[in-house]
Image (cartoon, rainbow, N blue to C red):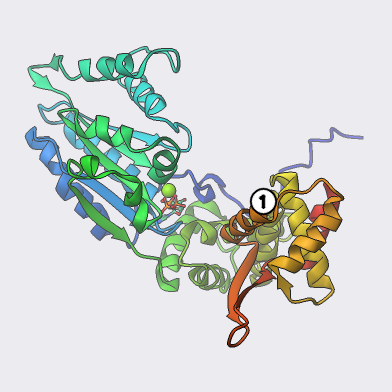
Amino acid sequence: MGNIFDNLGKKTVFKDKKPLDHRFLPENLPHRNEQIMQIAKYWSEALNNVTPSDVTLYGKTGTGKTAAAKFAKEQLNEAAKDKNVFVRVEYIRCTDYTTEYQVIAQLCQQLGRNVPHRGWTKGEIVNTFRDIFRQTSFGKKLILIVILDEIDILLEKDGDGILYTLTRTDNVSILSISNYVDFKKFIKPRVMSSLRDKEIVFPPYGADQLADILSERAELAFDEGVLEDDVIPLCSAMAAKEEGDARYALDLLRTAGEIAVDEDSDIVRGEYVRQAKDVIEHNKVTDIIRTLPSQQQRVLEAILILTQQNEEITSGKLYDTYKEVSKGDSVTYRRIFDFINELEMLGIISTNTISRGRGKGRTNIIKLQCDDKLLENTLYAI
Ligand SMILES: Nc1ncnc2c1ncn2[C@@H]1O[C@H](COP(=O)(O)OP(=O)(O)OP(=O)(O)O)[C@@H](O)[C@H]1O
Ligand SMILES: [Mg+2]
Protein backbone atom coordinates (compact mmCIF):
# COMPACT_ATOMS: atom_id res chain seq x y z
CA MET A 1 0.00 0.00 0.00
CA GLY A 2 1.28 3.43 -0.91
CA ASN A 3 1.08 6.43 1.33
CA ILE A 4 -2.48 7.53 2.04
CA PHE A 5 -1.63 11.08 0.93
CA ASP A 6 -0.19 10.01 -2.42
CA ASN A 7 -3.33 10.26 -4.47
CA LEU A 8 -4.95 13.08 -2.61
CA GLY A 9 -5.04 16.50 -4.20
CA LYS A 10 -3.78 15.22 -7.53
CA LYS A 11 -6.54 15.57 -10.04
CA THR A 12 -8.22 18.92 -9.86
CA VAL A 13 -9.91 21.54 -11.97
CA PHE A 14 -8.34 24.33 -9.92
CA LYS A 15 -5.20 26.17 -10.87
CA ASP A 16 -5.28 28.21 -7.64
CA LYS A 17 -8.19 28.25 -5.24
CA LYS A 18 -7.22 31.45 -3.44
CA PRO A 19 -8.93 33.85 -5.86
CA LEU A 20 -12.25 32.20 -4.95
CA ASP A 21 -11.74 32.88 -1.25
CA HIS A 22 -13.75 35.73 0.28
CA ARG A 23 -10.64 37.38 1.63
CA PHE A 24 -8.87 37.56 -1.72
CA LEU A 25 -8.48 41.15 -2.84
CA PRO A 26 -8.51 41.33 -6.63
CA GLU A 27 -6.41 43.87 -8.51
CA ASN A 28 -9.46 45.05 -10.29
CA LEU A 29 -13.04 45.51 -9.07
CA PRO A 30 -15.37 45.58 -12.06
CA HIS A 31 -18.47 47.78 -11.70
CA ARG A 32 -17.23 49.54 -8.60
CA ASN A 33 -15.16 52.21 -10.28
CA GLU A 34 -17.65 54.95 -9.50
CA GLN A 35 -17.75 54.14 -5.77
CA ILE A 36 -13.97 53.76 -5.56
CA MET A 37 -13.41 57.07 -7.32
CA GLN A 38 -15.81 58.75 -4.88
CA ILE A 39 -13.78 57.44 -1.95
CA ALA A 40 -10.60 58.57 -3.71
CA LYS A 41 -12.03 62.05 -4.24
CA TYR A 42 -12.69 62.52 -0.52
CA TRP A 43 -9.47 60.88 0.59
CA SER A 44 -7.31 62.83 -1.85
CA GLU A 45 -7.50 65.73 0.60
CA ALA A 46 -5.07 63.77 2.76
CA LEU A 47 -2.42 64.14 0.05
CA ASN A 48 -2.75 67.90 0.46
CA ASN A 49 -2.28 67.47 4.21
CA VAL A 50 -5.94 68.12 4.99
CA THR A 51 -7.98 65.67 7.09
CA PRO A 52 -10.59 64.16 4.74
CA SER A 53 -14.35 64.19 5.43
CA ASP A 54 -15.81 61.18 7.12
CA VAL A 55 -17.33 58.71 4.66
CA THR A 56 -19.99 56.04 5.07
CA LEU A 57 -20.44 53.09 2.72
CA TYR A 58 -23.85 51.46 2.68
CA GLY A 59 -25.08 48.40 0.88
CA LYS A 60 -26.43 44.91 1.25
CA THR A 61 -24.19 41.96 1.88
CA GLY A 62 -21.72 41.01 -0.85
CA THR A 63 -21.92 44.29 -2.76
CA GLY A 64 -18.18 44.94 -2.56
CA LYS A 65 -18.00 47.46 0.31
CA THR A 66 -15.13 45.82 2.15
CA ALA A 67 -13.28 45.07 -1.08
CA ALA A 68 -13.65 48.67 -2.33
CA ALA A 69 -12.49 50.15 0.99
CA LYS A 70 -9.45 47.89 1.15
CA PHE A 71 -8.65 48.63 -2.47
CA ALA A 72 -8.78 52.38 -1.83
CA LYS A 73 -6.62 51.86 1.28
CA GLU A 74 -3.87 50.14 -0.71
CA GLN A 75 -4.01 52.84 -3.36
CA LEU A 76 -3.80 55.73 -0.90
CA ASN A 77 -0.98 54.16 1.09
CA GLU A 78 0.89 53.77 -2.19
CA ALA A 79 0.16 57.29 -3.40
CA ALA A 80 1.21 58.74 -0.04
CA LYS A 81 4.60 57.04 -0.26
CA ASP A 82 5.66 59.22 -3.16
CA LYS A 83 4.54 62.41 -1.48
CA ASN A 84 5.91 64.33 1.41
CA VAL A 85 2.88 63.56 3.59
CA PHE A 86 2.32 61.32 6.56
CA VAL A 87 -0.94 59.46 5.92
CA ARG A 88 -2.03 56.11 7.26
CA VAL A 89 -5.17 54.12 6.52
CA GLU A 90 -5.96 51.49 9.14
CA TYR A 91 -8.59 48.79 8.77
CA ILE A 92 -10.59 47.55 11.78
CA ARG A 93 -13.26 44.89 11.56
CA CYS A 94 -15.69 45.60 14.36
CA THR A 95 -16.66 41.95 14.68
CA ASP A 96 -13.11 41.37 15.95
CA TYR A 97 -12.87 44.54 18.09
CA THR A 98 -16.27 45.10 19.62
CA THR A 99 -15.71 47.89 22.13
CA GLU A 100 -14.33 51.40 21.97
CA TYR A 101 -11.43 50.35 24.18
CA GLN A 102 -10.53 47.42 21.94
CA VAL A 103 -10.68 49.51 18.78
CA ILE A 104 -8.50 52.29 20.16
CA ALA A 105 -6.04 49.78 21.63
CA GLN A 106 -5.85 47.99 18.30
CA LEU A 107 -5.28 51.28 16.46
CA CYS A 108 -2.44 52.10 18.87
CA GLN A 109 -0.94 48.67 18.17
CA GLN A 110 -1.24 49.09 14.42
CA LEU A 111 0.45 52.47 14.72
CA GLY A 112 3.34 51.00 16.66
CA ARG A 113 2.36 51.74 20.27
CA ASN A 114 2.49 48.78 22.56
CA VAL A 115 -0.62 49.02 24.75
CA PRO A 116 -2.46 46.32 26.69
CA HIS A 117 -5.67 44.97 25.20
CA ARG A 118 -7.31 45.34 28.61
CA GLY A 119 -6.58 46.73 32.02
CA TRP A 120 -6.07 50.40 31.35
CA THR A 121 -8.81 52.95 31.84
CA LYS A 122 -10.48 54.35 28.76
CA GLY A 123 -8.90 57.73 29.51
CA GLU A 124 -5.42 56.23 29.51
CA ILE A 125 -5.88 54.44 26.22
CA VAL A 126 -7.45 57.49 24.53
CA ASN A 127 -4.61 59.72 25.75
CA THR A 128 -2.01 57.34 24.38
CA PHE A 129 -3.86 57.28 21.06
CA ARG A 130 -4.03 61.07 20.87
CA ASP A 131 -0.40 61.33 21.82
CA ILE A 132 0.50 59.69 18.50
CA PHE A 133 -0.76 62.79 16.72
CA ARG A 134 1.39 65.16 18.74
CA GLN A 135 4.58 63.86 17.27
CA THR A 136 5.62 64.71 13.79
CA SER A 137 7.38 62.83 11.08
CA PHE A 138 9.56 64.91 8.73
CA GLY A 139 7.78 68.03 9.92
CA LYS A 140 4.35 66.59 9.06
CA LYS A 141 1.66 65.50 11.45
CA LEU A 142 0.02 62.12 10.96
CA ILE A 143 -3.33 62.06 9.17
CA LEU A 144 -5.16 58.86 10.06
CA ILE A 145 -8.07 57.34 8.18
CA VAL A 146 -9.80 54.61 10.17
CA ILE A 147 -11.95 52.08 8.31
CA LEU A 148 -14.59 50.76 10.72
CA ASP A 149 -16.05 47.76 8.90
CA GLU A 150 -19.34 46.28 10.18
CA ILE A 151 -19.75 49.30 12.42
CA ASP A 152 -23.35 48.33 13.29
CA ILE A 153 -22.05 45.59 15.57
CA LEU A 154 -19.84 47.96 17.54
CA LEU A 155 -22.51 50.65 17.88
CA GLU A 156 -25.15 48.21 18.97
CA LYS A 157 -22.89 46.56 21.51
CA ASP A 158 -20.90 49.45 22.90
CA GLY A 159 -22.72 52.65 21.95
CA ASP A 160 -21.37 55.56 19.95
CA GLY A 161 -18.42 56.41 22.23
CA ILE A 162 -15.95 55.29 19.59
CA LEU A 163 -17.31 57.84 17.12
CA TYR A 164 -17.29 60.50 19.81
CA THR A 165 -13.62 59.85 20.52
CA LEU A 166 -12.50 59.57 16.91
CA THR A 167 -14.44 62.58 15.63
CA ARG A 168 -12.94 64.61 18.47
CA THR A 169 -9.40 63.66 17.66
CA ASP A 170 -7.78 66.09 15.24
CA ASN A 171 -6.38 64.60 12.05
CA VAL A 172 -8.62 61.51 12.18
CA SER A 173 -11.10 60.70 9.44
CA ILE A 174 -13.52 57.77 9.65
CA LEU A 175 -14.78 55.52 6.89
CA SER A 176 -17.66 53.47 8.26
CA ILE A 177 -19.14 50.46 6.50
CA SER A 178 -22.66 49.31 7.25
CA ASN A 179 -25.24 46.91 5.88
CA TYR A 180 -28.06 49.05 7.17
CA VAL A 181 -29.14 52.47 6.07
CA ASP A 182 -30.62 53.10 9.51
CA PHE A 183 -27.47 52.32 11.53
CA LYS A 184 -27.33 55.97 12.53
CA LYS A 185 -30.19 55.38 14.94
CA PHE A 186 -27.46 54.19 17.30
CA ILE A 187 -25.70 57.55 17.16
CA LYS A 188 -26.74 60.32 19.55
CA PRO A 189 -27.15 63.90 18.29
CA ARG A 190 -24.03 65.20 20.07
CA VAL A 191 -21.95 62.74 18.01
CA MET A 192 -23.99 63.06 14.82
CA SER A 193 -23.22 66.78 14.72
CA SER A 194 -19.48 66.12 14.47
CA LEU A 195 -19.82 63.22 12.05
CA ARG A 196 -20.48 65.17 8.90
CA ASP A 197 -20.11 62.20 6.63
CA LYS A 198 -20.46 61.72 2.91
CA GLU A 199 -22.51 58.70 1.98
CA ILE A 200 -21.71 56.29 -0.82
CA VAL A 201 -24.23 53.63 -1.79
CA PHE A 202 -23.32 50.18 -3.09
CA PRO A 203 -26.26 48.85 -5.07
CA PRO A 204 -26.76 45.08 -5.54
CA TYR A 205 -25.06 43.62 -8.60
CA GLY A 206 -27.10 42.53 -11.59
CA ALA A 207 -26.53 39.15 -13.24
CA ASP A 208 -24.33 40.59 -16.02
CA GLN A 209 -22.15 42.43 -13.53
CA LEU A 210 -21.73 39.30 -11.44
CA ALA A 211 -20.74 37.41 -14.61
CA ASP A 212 -17.94 39.94 -15.24
CA ILE A 213 -16.72 39.60 -11.65
CA LEU A 214 -16.77 35.80 -11.81
CA SER A 215 -15.05 35.66 -15.20
CA GLU A 216 -12.04 37.54 -13.86
CA ARG A 217 -11.81 35.31 -10.81
CA ALA A 218 -12.39 32.14 -12.83
CA GLU A 219 -9.46 32.94 -15.08
CA LEU A 220 -7.16 33.06 -12.07
CA ALA A 221 -8.68 30.09 -10.29
CA PHE A 222 -9.51 27.41 -12.85
CA ASP A 223 -7.48 25.54 -15.42
CA GLU A 224 -8.23 26.69 -18.91
CA GLY A 225 -11.33 25.28 -20.56
CA VAL A 226 -12.67 23.38 -17.55
CA LEU A 227 -15.82 25.46 -17.08
CA GLU A 228 -18.85 24.51 -19.14
CA ASP A 229 -20.31 27.52 -20.89
CA ASP A 230 -23.33 27.81 -18.65
CA VAL A 231 -21.46 27.67 -15.33
CA ILE A 232 -20.77 31.40 -14.91
CA PRO A 233 -24.16 32.53 -16.27
CA LEU A 234 -25.87 30.12 -13.86
CA CYS A 235 -23.88 31.25 -10.82
CA SER A 236 -24.54 34.88 -11.74
CA ALA A 237 -28.26 34.44 -12.31
CA MET A 238 -28.69 32.54 -9.06
CA ALA A 239 -26.72 35.11 -7.06
CA ALA A 240 -28.53 38.02 -8.72
CA LYS A 241 -31.74 36.54 -7.30
CA GLU A 242 -30.10 36.45 -3.86
CA GLU A 243 -29.93 40.25 -3.74
CA GLY A 244 -26.91 40.63 -6.05
CA ASP A 245 -24.49 39.09 -3.58
CA ALA A 246 -21.01 38.62 -5.11
CA ARG A 247 -19.88 36.50 -2.16
CA TYR A 248 -22.67 34.02 -2.84
CA ALA A 249 -21.79 33.98 -6.55
CA LEU A 250 -18.17 33.15 -5.67
CA ASP A 251 -19.32 30.47 -3.22
CA LEU A 252 -21.43 28.85 -5.93
CA LEU A 253 -18.53 28.83 -8.37
CA ARG A 254 -16.04 27.45 -5.86
CA THR A 255 -18.44 24.80 -4.57
CA ALA A 256 -19.30 23.72 -8.13
CA GLY A 257 -15.57 23.26 -8.72
CA GLU A 258 -15.25 21.25 -5.52
CA ILE A 259 -18.11 19.01 -6.61
CA ALA A 260 -16.29 18.42 -9.92
CA VAL A 261 -13.21 17.33 -7.96
CA ASP A 262 -15.31 15.05 -5.74
CA GLU A 263 -16.92 13.52 -8.80
CA ASP A 264 -13.53 13.01 -10.43
CA SER A 265 -14.69 15.11 -13.35
CA ASP A 266 -12.31 17.07 -15.62
CA ILE A 267 -14.90 19.72 -16.23
CA VAL A 268 -17.23 21.79 -14.08
CA ARG A 269 -20.76 21.19 -15.32
CA GLY A 270 -23.83 23.39 -15.06
CA GLU A 271 -25.58 20.77 -12.97
CA TYR A 272 -22.85 21.08 -10.34
CA VAL A 273 -23.85 24.69 -9.83
CA ARG A 274 -27.38 23.58 -8.99
CA GLN A 275 -25.99 21.01 -6.60
CA ALA A 276 -23.70 23.68 -5.14
CA LYS A 277 -26.75 25.74 -4.24
CA ASP A 278 -28.09 22.88 -2.10
CA VAL A 279 -24.72 22.25 -0.49
CA ILE A 280 -24.35 25.92 0.49
CA GLU A 281 -27.93 26.19 1.71
CA HIS A 282 -27.45 23.01 3.68
CA ASN A 283 -24.24 24.20 5.33
CA LYS A 284 -25.70 27.57 6.15
CA VAL A 285 -28.86 26.25 7.76
CA THR A 286 -27.11 23.49 9.69
CA ASP A 287 -24.49 25.93 10.99
CA ILE A 288 -27.16 28.32 12.21
CA ILE A 289 -29.30 25.64 13.83
CA ARG A 290 -26.40 23.91 15.52
CA THR A 291 -25.25 27.10 17.20
CA LEU A 292 -28.68 28.18 18.48
CA PRO A 293 -29.32 28.12 22.23
CA SER A 294 -31.17 24.95 23.18
CA GLN A 295 -34.45 26.68 24.05
CA GLN A 296 -34.52 28.14 20.55
CA GLN A 297 -33.85 24.73 19.12
CA ARG A 298 -36.91 23.48 21.04
CA VAL A 299 -38.99 26.27 19.52
CA LEU A 300 -37.79 25.19 16.08
CA GLU A 301 -38.62 21.61 16.90
CA ALA A 302 -42.15 22.67 17.78
CA ILE A 303 -42.42 24.57 14.48
CA LEU A 304 -41.16 21.48 12.66
CA ILE A 305 -43.74 19.21 14.32
CA LEU A 306 -46.60 21.58 13.49
CA THR A 307 -45.34 22.00 9.91
CA GLN A 308 -45.23 18.26 9.40
CA GLN A 309 -48.78 18.01 10.75
CA ASN A 310 -49.78 20.63 8.17
CA GLU A 311 -51.02 22.90 10.91
CA GLU A 312 -51.39 26.64 10.53
CA ILE A 313 -48.92 27.88 13.14
CA THR A 314 -50.12 30.66 15.43
CA SER A 315 -48.04 31.87 18.36
CA GLY A 316 -50.49 30.30 20.81
CA LYS A 317 -50.37 26.92 19.13
CA LEU A 318 -46.61 27.14 18.89
CA TYR A 319 -46.31 27.84 22.60
CA ASP A 320 -48.45 24.81 23.50
CA THR A 321 -46.40 22.50 21.32
CA TYR A 322 -43.17 24.04 22.53
CA LYS A 323 -44.18 23.34 26.16
CA GLU A 324 -44.76 19.70 25.30
CA VAL A 325 -41.42 19.46 23.52
CA SER A 326 -39.47 21.10 26.32
CA LYS A 327 -41.12 18.95 28.98
CA GLY A 328 -41.52 21.45 31.77
CA ASP A 329 -38.20 23.22 31.20
CA SER A 330 -39.74 26.05 29.21
CA VAL A 331 -39.45 29.81 28.95
CA THR A 332 -42.33 32.29 29.18
CA TYR A 333 -44.79 33.04 26.40
CA ARG A 334 -43.33 36.54 26.18
CA ARG A 335 -39.83 35.19 25.52
CA ILE A 336 -41.14 33.09 22.64
CA PHE A 337 -41.80 36.29 20.70
CA ASP A 338 -38.13 37.25 20.97
CA PHE A 339 -37.18 33.81 19.71
CA ILE A 340 -39.59 34.11 16.79
CA ASN A 341 -38.08 37.49 15.87
CA GLU A 342 -34.56 36.13 16.02
CA LEU A 343 -35.39 33.06 13.94
CA GLU A 344 -37.04 35.32 11.39
CA MET A 345 -33.96 37.55 11.23
CA LEU A 346 -31.87 34.45 10.57
CA GLY A 347 -34.18 33.62 7.67
CA ILE A 348 -35.21 30.23 9.05
CA ILE A 349 -38.87 31.18 9.49
CA SER A 350 -41.16 33.92 8.27
CA THR A 351 -44.13 35.50 9.98
CA ASN A 352 -47.17 37.05 8.48
CA THR A 353 -49.85 38.96 10.35
CA ILE A 354 -53.35 38.25 9.13
CA SER A 355 -56.68 39.66 10.13
CA ARG A 356 -59.35 37.17 11.14
CA GLY A 357 -62.16 39.52 10.25
CA ARG A 358 -64.01 42.16 12.23
CA GLY A 359 -63.75 41.96 15.98
CA LYS A 360 -61.59 38.88 15.89
CA GLY A 361 -58.25 40.68 15.95
CA ARG A 362 -55.05 39.87 14.19
CA THR A 363 -52.98 36.74 14.30
CA ASN A 364 -49.37 36.00 13.55
CA ILE A 365 -48.86 33.03 11.24
CA ILE A 366 -45.45 31.39 11.33
CA LYS A 367 -43.97 29.51 8.40
CA LEU A 368 -40.83 27.47 8.07
CA GLN A 369 -38.49 28.89 5.43
CA CYS A 370 -36.01 26.05 5.20
CA ASP A 371 -36.43 22.48 4.09
CA ASP A 372 -38.23 20.52 6.84
CA LYS A 373 -36.21 17.35 6.22
CA LEU A 374 -32.99 19.29 6.53
CA LEU A 375 -34.22 20.84 9.79
CA GLU A 376 -35.29 17.45 11.08
CA ASN A 377 -31.94 15.84 10.32
CA THR A 378 -30.03 18.68 11.90
CA LEU A 379 -32.18 18.97 15.03
CA TYR A 380 -32.15 15.28 15.77
CA ALA A 381 -28.45 14.89 15.03
CA ILE A 382 -27.56 17.35 17.78
N1 LIG B 1 -16.70 44.45 -8.08
C1 LIG B 1 -16.08 43.35 -7.63
N2 LIG B 1 -15.09 42.79 -8.34
C2 LIG B 1 -14.46 41.68 -7.89
N3 LIG B 1 -14.77 41.06 -6.75
C3 LIG B 1 -15.77 41.57 -6.01
C4 LIG B 1 -16.47 42.75 -6.40
N4 LIG B 1 -17.40 43.02 -5.48
C5 LIG B 1 -17.29 42.07 -4.54
N5 LIG B 1 -16.31 41.20 -4.86
C6 LIG B 1 -15.91 40.04 -4.08
O1 LIG B 1 -17.08 39.48 -3.49
C7 LIG B 1 -16.84 39.14 -2.13
C8 LIG B 1 -17.77 39.94 -1.24
O2 LIG B 1 -17.43 41.32 -1.32
P1 LIG B 1 -17.25 42.23 -0.03
O3 LIG B 1 -16.71 41.40 1.08
O4 LIG B 1 -16.52 43.44 -0.40
O5 LIG B 1 -18.77 42.57 0.26
P2 LIG B 1 -19.40 43.49 1.39
O6 LIG B 1 -20.24 44.50 0.69
O7 LIG B 1 -18.34 43.98 2.28
O8 LIG B 1 -20.37 42.47 2.13
P3 LIG B 1 -20.78 42.43 3.68
O9 LIG B 1 -21.76 43.52 3.89
O10 LIG B 1 -21.42 41.08 3.83
O11 LIG B 1 -19.54 42.57 4.48
C9 LIG B 1 -15.38 39.40 -1.88
O12 LIG B 1 -14.65 38.21 -2.05
C10 LIG B 1 -15.00 40.42 -2.93
O13 LIG B 1 -13.66 40.33 -3.30
MG1 LIG C 1 -17.87 43.53 4.24
Q: Quadrant of residue 213?
A: bottom left
Which residue is painted at 27% across and 14% down in the image?
A: 128
Taking 63 as reference, is 170 above or below it?
A: above
> 255 or 268, which lies in front?
255
| Amino acid at the residue labelled 1 | Ile
Is residue 199 rendered to the left or right of residue 107? left
Instruction: Report the residue marked by disc 1.
Output: 288
Q: Residue 111: image x %, image y %?
A: 30, 20
Q: Residues within 10 Å of mark 1 (few under 14, many from 20)?
A: few
Q: Is residue 123 visible?
A: yes
Q: Secondary structure at mark 1?
A: helix
Which residue is painted at 64% across and 71% down in the image?
A: 270
Q: Quadrant of residue 230?
A: bottom right
Q: Residue 23: image x %, image y %?
A: 48, 43
Respond yes or no on whether mark 1 lies under 8 Å from ligand 1.
no
Which residue is painted at 67% across and 51% down in the image?
A: 288
Q: Residue 121: image x %, image y %?
A: 37, 15
